[in-house]
Image (cartoon, rainbow, N blue to C red):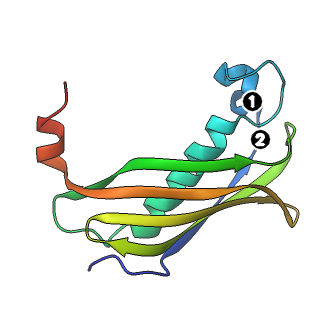
Amino acid sequence: MAPRTGLSARIELEVTEADTAEAFRSGTVPVLATPRLVALCEEASCQAIDGHLPEGGTSVAKRVQFDHLVPVGVGRKVWAEATLDRIEGRRLVFTLSVSENGGLVGAGKLVRVVVDRATFLGNVR
């Protein structure tokens, strides 16, 4: 089954010390790290298209645009959602959002490209 617009997935995360900027070495504060937010959104995008790619196919991230709007502390829960908005040949364009208790924590866009897994891995340096 081919990907189609509207596919989406939502993932919940309870923030732990391992998810902080300190742990990711992306800052010196004990709050949810921006790289962790982006990874959570990527995971949601992969789940959204799971089972919708050709045999032997996978997708890889090509471009991420993301705004991290508010800090989130350890012990809080966030929800990341990725929705497939556009399909441009092999390019899949997702809208991303991360929320906590109804408030927006971050938002952005992600472009993934559908590739043949074996061919892609054959080009790894």
The amino acid at mark 2 is: Val
The residue singled out by tag 2 in the image is: 15
The residue singled out by tag 1 in the image is: 20
Q: Where in the figure is residue 107, as x and y percent of width and height?
A: 69, 57
- In the displayed structure image, the side of residue 98 where residue 95 appears, left or right: left
- In the displayed structure image, the side of residue 21 where residue 84 appears, left or right: left
Q: Quadrant of residue 10?
A: bottom right
Disc 1 element: loop
Residue visible at 19% across and 30% down in the picture: 124
Q: Quadrant of residue 112?
A: bottom left
- In the displayed structure image, the side of residue 87 where residue 90 appears, left or right: left
Number of residues whose C-alpha sits closer than 10 Å to that of mark 2, classed few (under 14), some (14–19) or many (20 or more): some
Residue 7 to residue 40: above or below:
below
Residue 10 to residue 19: above or below:
below
Q: Where in the figure is residue 41, as x and y percent of width and height?
A: 58, 53
User: Sequence order check: which comes first, mark 1 or mark 2?
Assistant: 2
**Label 2 near label 1: C-beta < 8 Å?**
yes
Which numbered disc, 1 or 2, marks the residue closer to the eye? 1
Distance from the alpha carbon under mark 1 to that under mark 2: 8 Å
Residue visible at 11% across and 36% down in the picture: 122
Q: Nearer the viewer, residue 14 or 122?
A: 122
As drawn, the label of residue 49 is none
Disc 2 element: loop
Q: Where in the figure is residue 79, as x and y percent of width and height?
A: 72, 59
